[in-house]
Image (spheres, rainbow, N blue to C red):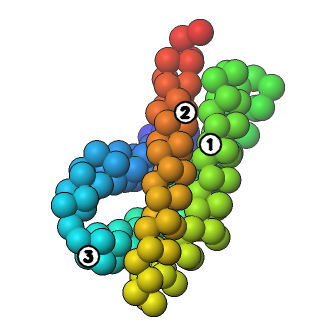
Amino acid sequence: MTAHHLMLFLHLCGVIVWVGGMVFAWGCLRPAALQLAPDKRLSLWAGVLQTFFRMVWVSIALIMLSGIAMLVEVGFARAPIAWHMMLLTGMVMIGVFISIWFGPWRALQEAVGAENWARAAVAMNTIRQRVGFNLGLGLLTTALATLGLGL
């Protein structure tokens, strides 16, 4: 095993947790949660996101450190264009996540704590929209990382 293989493994672990978590949230948890009363639904989301967002921070660290290590190993000038495009879309994803963390995520936590369900619903809707955007970017990034190498 080489350092490159280890970095690729760590990179994929981070991607699987982050993108897979978004797929689970959109495709499984969201439809099930819609069956709940607003107070139960929003409390559930706040609890789930608290755990998931901590995992996303770890994933971002793994993805960034391993990705940069692999780029440095190959050399930025010799890296495939798909890697540079993946870096760009990944940085946008990180920016979107940071915007969630410092904006609607904090608003959701405060609103759920105060049992202000209308405000919590607005915050959760904003989170849902941004996560949906990030999910699309995550799938695009995955396509760039795989199919883009064949261009």
Residue assigned mark 3: 40
Residue 56: tell me if it is visible: no
Q: Is residue 3 above or below residue 25?
A: above
- Residue at the image position 30 percent from the left and 77 percent from the top: 39
- Numbered disc in front, either 1 or 3: 3
Query: What kind of residue is marked 1?
Result: Gly
Q: Are marks 3 and 2 in contact (CB under 8 Å)?
A: no
Q: Are marks 2 and 1 in contact (CB under 8 Å)?
A: yes
Q: Is residue 133 above or below residue 123?
A: above
Query: What kind of residue is marked 3?
Result: Lys
Which quadrant is home to the N terminus? Answer: top left
Q: Label 2: state its secondary structure.
A: helix
**Outermost residue to the right:** 77
Q: Label 3: state its secondary structure.
A: helix
Residue assigned mark 1: 90
Q: Is residue 107 left or right of residue 55?
A: right
- Residue at the image position 44 percent from the left and 83 percent from the top: 116
Q: Nearer the viewer, residue 57 or 6?
A: 57
Q: Which mark is residue 141?
A: 2
- Residue at the image position 23 percent from the left and 71 percent from the top: 37
Residue 117: % across, % down: 40, 77
The quadrant in which residue 49 appears is bottom left
